Image: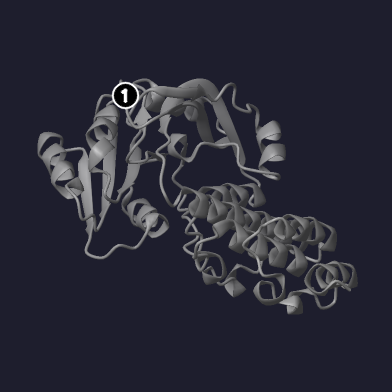
Amino acid sequence: MEKNSEISVIMSVYNSEKYLDQSIQSILDQSSRDFEFIIVNDASTDRSLEIIKKYQKRDERIILLNNEKNIGLTKSLNEALNEAKGSYIARQDADDVSLPERLGKQYRLLEKTKNVFLCGTSGIDIDEKGNILRDNGRVIVGCEKVKKRLRKGNCIIHSSIMFRNHGFTYRDKFRYSQDYDFYLNLLTKGLKLDNLEEKLIEYRTVPSNTCTLKKNKQVLFAKKARTFYRQRIKTGKDKYGEFDPLEILGMEGNDPKKVFLELNMEIHLKGKDPNSARRVLFEYKKLESVSYIDSLPYSICIGFPSVYKVYRRFCYGD
């Protein structure tokens, strides 16, 4: 690495023994050597801690933070950020793989382009065995284009980012989509975000029985992030302090789509968007498992006559 610049790579690990060797090694094999590697073991119950300690003995750049209790990804990343001493922060997920030139190319971009605060990279989706699932194609490049796209949805791969270490952390209540909320907060502060077009990260997609439920929670947290962003743009502050994440994290049961649609509609109503709420209600109607009279509290429709009228027709045949 040129000069004496320093990078802090941060990783949170929870029961990731299956892919952890490959992920850690991909960082240690970077062509740029001047970095510290902060790994948070978030109370794993598998061999993850043993694997991390094995690499720590081999490479003094590894700093291990060991949580006695599981606190989740967001808080674990903040622990690592508070420990980081580098001028730049680079993220790495415990099941992803960074290609050898990743850190060097991102570092050179940020050193050269002083007005860019954060940059991600393009990536390739891989499966459990490392086989390529799909090429993500060309990522959105250019600060203004990235800003425009982020207002509608996430366009930066979390595990690929590097950003300047100016003391920013993730907001704890965002158990999911914490990266998206982080990016939108940076935009609010007038900072510029960009992507490198090169594919420098392999992003692992692993099937899970809880995949649908998790995805629904991610979508709802992302919607909250956008809502808070619009509030900050309009008034200079948001209502994060009033936000109770349990209204989303409480999504459980045999029909996650039903719960997702219920919460999604409630968010639209609270956001005074009855037209969107009405569209969600039509989707809700299609679910065979729904008991319309009992499952969807009509109280959330009060104050929105058009939605309440639709709700009454579906529930009672009015």
The quadrant the C terminus occupies is bottom right
Between residues 262 and 54, which one lies in front from this camera angle?
262
Residue at screen point 37% across, 59% down: 72
Residue 307 horizontal side relative to residue 33, left or right: right
Q: Quadrant of residue 312?
A: bottom right
* Amino acid type indicated by mark 1: Ser
Residue at screen point 71% across, 55% down: 286
Judging from the image, the colouring scheme is one colour
Between residues 94 and 285, which one lies in front from this camera angle?
285
Residue 108: in sight, yes or no? no
Q: Is residue 85 above or below residue 60?
A: below
Task: Measuring from the top left, give residue 300's x and y in whole percent.
Answer: 74, 75
Instruction: Determine whether the residue tagged by mark 1 lies in a helix, strand or loop.
Output: loop
Write down the residue under mark 1: 32
Q: Is residue 217 above or below residue 51?
A: below
The quadrant the N terminus occupies is top left
Task: Measuring from the top left, give residue 253's x and y in whole percent.
Answer: 49, 65
Residue 87 horizontal side relative to residue 62, left or right: right
Between residues 171 and 138, which one lies in front from this camera angle?
138
Task: Measuring from the top left, give residue 242's x and y in whole percent.
Answer: 61, 74
Residue 281 horizontal side relative to residue 212, left or right: right
Residue at screen point 57% across, 47% down: 183
Residue 155: in sight, yes or no? yes
Task: Measuring from the top left, give residue 315's x and y in whole percent.
Answer: 78, 72
Q: Is residue 302 above or below residue 154?
A: below
Q: Quadrant of residue 18?
A: top left
Q: How many marks do you count on the picture?
A: 1
- Label 1 crowd bin: few (<14), some (14–19), many (20+), radius 10 Å: some
Q: Is residue 181 above or below residue 27?
A: below
